[in-house]
Amino acid sequence: MPHWLLKSEPDVFGYPDLQRVGREPWNGVRNYQARNHLRAMRVGDLCLFYHSNAKPTGIAGIARVSVEAHPDNLQFDPASPYHDPKSPLDTPRWSMVEVVPVRAFPRVLTLDALRGLPEWAESPLIRKGTRLSVLPVTDTEFRAALAAVGLDADTL
DNA sequence: GCCAACGTTGGC
DNA sequence: GCCAACGTTGGC
């Protein structure tokens, strides 16, 4: 099963917010590569929930895809900052999925700690300048991240 | 708040 | 199709 990493700014919407609301439309993604990842997601796929622009930055929990890609509602909303007037009505440009919370990490697995995991050495997340907000995570990376905070991927 | 890295836009 | 200008992301 593929895994993913979703970035979010906790000041806007953090993992505790996902736990509070129970499910969340992952809309507002306006980058083609990230959108293509959203479209590749399947129901049940597990996602690492990453806090960016935070203190500390890092993985705060696990989410699961509950609804697969469908048109992002905000692209047609003129009042939204994510409005895209160029998106064709019949072939919407932007997609969103829905995610639900699975498990909070017992502590945030910081970016620094991730850099220290050999399994994560090749991840784009570690590479300087990668701004992708939705990115694939290998099974090895996923398991290593969970193990680093004492969670077992097989008992979620 | 700074700024490097990167994606997008638009003139030509 | 090139590429400079611009806007955004995100770590620090």
Image (cartoon, coloured by chain):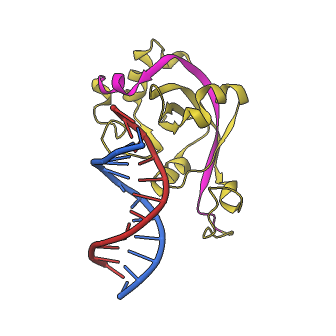
Chain colours: A yellow, B blue, C red
* Residue A144 appearing in the image: yes
Seen in the image, is A126 located left or right of residue A59? left
Front-most of residues A32 and A16: A16
Seen in the image, is A71 located left or right of residue A125? right
Relative to residue A135, is residue C12 depicted above or below? above
Residue at 72% in and 30% down: A21
Relative to residue A131, is residue A87 depicted above or below? below
Magenta span covers which residues? A91-117
Seen in the image, is A130 located left or right of residue A88? left
Q: Quadrant of residue A26?
A: top right
Relative to residue C9, is residue A59 depicted above or below? above
Relative to residue C4, is residue A37 depicted above or below? above
Residue A10 is one of the magenta-drawn residues: no
Residue A112 is one of the magenta-drawn residues: yes
Query: x, y percentage for residue A10?
Result: 56, 32
Residue at 66% in and 53% down: A70
Query: x, y percentage for residue A122?
Result: 29, 36
Query: x, y percentage for residue A83?
Result: 64, 60
Q: As drawn, which residue projects farthest toward the top?
A: A150
Residue at 31% in and 23% down: A117
Q: Quadrant of residue A156?
A: top right
